[in-house]
Amino acid sequence: MENRPVTTESPFVKGLLITSAVVILTLFLLMPLFAVFAEAFRRGWEVFIASLNEEAALSAIKLTLLAAAVSVPLNTLFGLSAAWLVTKFRFKGRAFLLSMIDLPFAVSPVIAGLVWVLMFGAQGWFGPWLAERDIEIIFALPGIILATVFVTFPFVARELIPLMEAQGSDQEEAAVTLGAGGWSIFWRVTLPNIKWGLLYGVLLCNARAMGEFGAVSVVSGHIRGKTNTLPLHVEVLYNEYQFSAAFACATLLAFLALVTLGLKSLLEQVTGQKAGGH
Amino acid sequence: MSISIRSINKTFGAYKALEDVSLEVPDGSLTALLGPSGSGKTTLLRIVAGLEFADDGPGKILFHGQDVGGVPAGKRGVGFVFQHYALFRHMTVAENIAFGLSVLPGKDKPGKKEIADRVKELLGLVKLEGLEKRRPHELSGGQRQRVALARALAIRPKVLLLDEPFGALDAQVRKDLRRWLRQFHDEIGLTTLFVTHDQEEALELSDEVVVMRNARVEQVGEPQEVYDRPRSPFVYEFLGNVNKLKESEGKARYLRPHEIEVVFAAEFDPRTDVMGKVLHLFSAGPVATLSLKLSDGQFVEVELSRKALDEMALDKGDEVAVRLTEG
């Protein structure tokens, strides 16, 4: 007699499902990753190193790090405040604010970039005013940062809102009755309760900030060695048929993705253990 | 310290949570706010604590005669114990208890040694010695409850407010903790106001019961008084079991199960008695409960001592005379 749980499929179906999962994973995720590294090293280590250790590439790396270094802390701050506002208070326009937080997810990155051009570009609303004062936003660093901030805005807030919603404000209220002030409550009660979720949100925000292509592409102007971020630099190299160099730079982005994934699963393990302890 | 609540109103949008509520809580008393859910009792407690604000108007909250309406929650000197304890998850028991002292501004903040001593003293008070290093998730419900209490007491509050203090505990722990809290209150003598929807808890534990219903205070009095002389049908029905007997012209008469007597059918007295038939009897414990169907078709529940039941040797289906005397 066959003795197996009712939820188990027959060996044939099981095998079919597992095989298709493996095939899809290999085709769509592992092969491309492998291809990036294989292409990057096809012409040897020296070429790989040389393509990275070159002025335009170094400048692109620097710009990408700079854009992330500004937009990630900003969005951490924005995300924290937004999540705190919509979860700890009930006010008019709360639902509207919630949907506005999601706007950057809903809008195409190209539009997100164009918005800034329309506002701060030479023909934009504030263009002439900025030109008179010699302030460059579009085709310059401020534009790239603006576009990155806009696109990566929801990551931290989206991560924190469900978490803080679930935690309620009981602990904060307890702290209030015990005489704690706003800062003490934030640092000693709210923040420790959300730190893992916050870290996770920051991680995702950073991955997107460094990898953003569409919005940044619109505002950057592709000035080589000046306003090209790493993803844009990869595209430029590729269009110029410098495949090895393009893939060499792409390995940096792929590496970033791997590190992000690694940290993410590490975080999930830590928080999973915490949750399991309850 | 006494608490005076004067003409408090509170609305949430279109919903009236409290309507012209006034109440005096004497110094050192243990007072229960009793009512069904939605009666406004928790809202009232939160307003006293300063976690919620009463509507503008003549309403006032006085502590020992001083208006505290403009005093923020953290400066009112209230110890508040939340229904689900609201312990700080990431802190140890000792850190939880010390929290109120450690957030005091620089000049008032006690030294490390002083805080540690106070924590130790409080742990002794709530009988949790040796648990200072534990985290909340490593404690049982009853232990968490007592940590929450110790944390509230650490700031030496002038009044203690408890929101459904036993609501999340199972029956046995509940009973033990109830008795312990009564003793504890008698030892420290702190003015205490607690919210409950459990009439037995309110009657057993408190010096004074405040029965609330639909945003209003229905009756205030000592437990015995509100139980024996309920001022309204609602209080009658809410405090313990009651038989509602319809009389002529839509009037009803309320009788507690123990206020009804059951005698042999042969002793039937037409002036006070109604004939009835035993539908069901339950006699585990010292008190037996009878369900009876009266000759006019109404049902009553009667409590009598196990001894009385045994003497009458009643059984299901027996006819008896039911004496509706009032206590």
Image: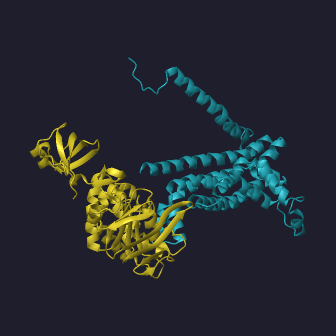
Chain colours: A cyan, B yellow
In the depicted structure, whether residue A44 falls above or below residue B206:
above
In the depicted structure, whether residue B259 falls above or below residue B59:
above
Q: Is residue B181 visible?
A: no
Q: Residue at x 52, y 20 (%)?
A: A12
B250 displayed left or right of B300:
right
Residue A41 rendering spot, x and y as whole percentages: 71, 40
Quarter holding residue B209: bottom left
Q: Residue at x 55, y 72 (%)?
A: B56
Q: Is residue B306 visible?
A: yes
Residue farthest to the left, as pictured? B311
Q: How many marks?
A: 0
Residue farthest to the top, as pictured? A1
Q: Using the image as rendered, state which of residue A228 and residue B128 is in the foreground.
A: B128
Residue B189 rendering spot, x and y as whole percentages: 29, 74
Q: Residue at x 27, y 53 (%)?
A: B172
Indicate the quadrant containing the N terminus of chain B: top left, top right, bottom left or bottom right. Answer: bottom left
Residue B52 rendering spot, x and y as whole percentages: 50, 67
Indicate the quadrant containing the C terminus of chain B: top left, top right, bottom left or bottom right. Answer: bottom left
Q: Using the image as rendered, state which of residue B69 and residue B21 is in the foreground.
A: B21
